[in-house]
Amino acid sequence: MHKIACMGDNCVDYYDAAGEMHFGGNPVNVAVYCARLGHEASYIGAVGDDSFGLGMRQAISGRQVDVSHLHTQAGSTALTHVSIVDGDRVFGEYDEGVMEDFHLSDEDVAFIKGHELAVSGLWGHCQDRLQELRGAGVYTAFDCSDRPEDPIALEAIPGADIIFFSDDSSSDEQLRGRIENIAALGTPLIVLATRGVKGSLAWDGSRFYEYGIHPCPVVDTMGAGDSYIAGFLCAWLDKKPVKECMEAGAMSSAQTLVYAGAW
C-alpha cells in the first residue's frame, strides 16, 4: 500500500438539466481513485462553511480518504455548472469560492512530507510548494490539464517528477515535439499526454511509449482523465514499466466512464 497526498482544488459539479450534483475536483478525484485502488490517500484543500462544504467532507471521507487537512473556511464551496452534450461534459459558470485564496500552510506541507507522492493540478494553488516537497524526497506529480503553457503550469513543471496534460488534437509528430519542449522546462521522470479516444503518449527521457484505450460504454466523461492519472501513478509507485502504468491508467479510466459523475 502506498501513501499519496492530493492537494488543491475541489468542486461541486452541478448538472443543471438533471438537477443533480456530484463532488469532485482534480486532486479530490485522484485521491478517491487511489483509495479505490487500495492505497492510503489524503486530500488537502479548503471548503466553505455551507452545506456543500459539509457534503464534500462527508463524501470524501466516505470514500476512505483522509480529510484531516481539509480546511473549512467562512464562505462558499467551489461550484461548477455542468451540462452533458453528446455524452461529453460541458462546463459552464464557475464560482471558485474559498479556494480562490487557498494556499498550503507550513503545517500542511509537513503533513504532505509524510507521503510517498504529492499530486496537484492547474487550479490547485500548490505549484509554489512542489520544489520544496521534491527536495524533501516526496515524488511530485502535476496535471496541466490542456494548458501546459499556462504560467501556473510553467511555475509547477520544474518541481514535478511526473507531468500530465491532455491533447487530443495535435498530430503524433506535433505532440512528440510538445512533450519534449515541456520536458526541457524541468527534470521530469515522465511526461505524459492523454489523447481521449486516441489513448496516451508518454516519454521517460529516452523513448516514447504509446497505449490505446479500453473500450467501454461511455455514460459520462467526468473524472476519466483523473482516474487515468490515479491508475498510472499507483502502478508507477509499484515500479511497473511505463507501458504497464499506461495500461493501468486506461483500465482505471474505463472503470469511471461507465457511470454518471466523477465517483
Image (spheres, grey):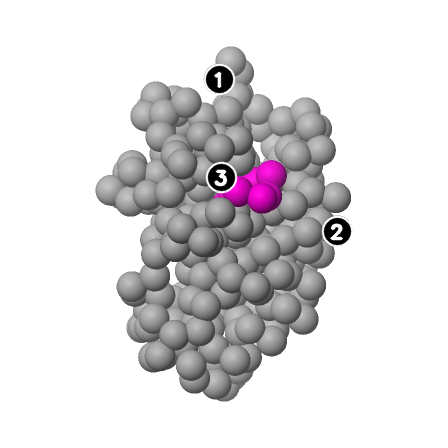
As measured in the structure, the alpha-carbon distance from the residue carrying label 3 to the one carrying label 1 is: 16 Å
The residue depicted at 62 percent of the width and 61 percent of the height is 66
Across and down, in percent, residue 193 comes to 47, 36
Q: Is residue 231 above or below residue 218?
A: above
Q: Which residue is mark 2?
A: 38
Disc 3 or disc 1, which is closer to the eye? 3
Circle 1 residue? 205
Report the side of 59 relative to 7 (left or right).
right
Q: Earlier in the sequence, mark 3 or mark 1?
A: 3
Image: 126 above or below 63: above
Horizontally, is 76 left or right of 51 in the view?
left
The Cα atoms of the two marked residues, 2 and 1, are separated by 29 Å
Q: Amino acid at mark 3?
A: Ala
Q: Which residues are magenta?
A: 113-120
Cβ–Cβ under 8 Å for marks 2 and 3: no
* Residue 31: percent from left, percent from top: 59, 55
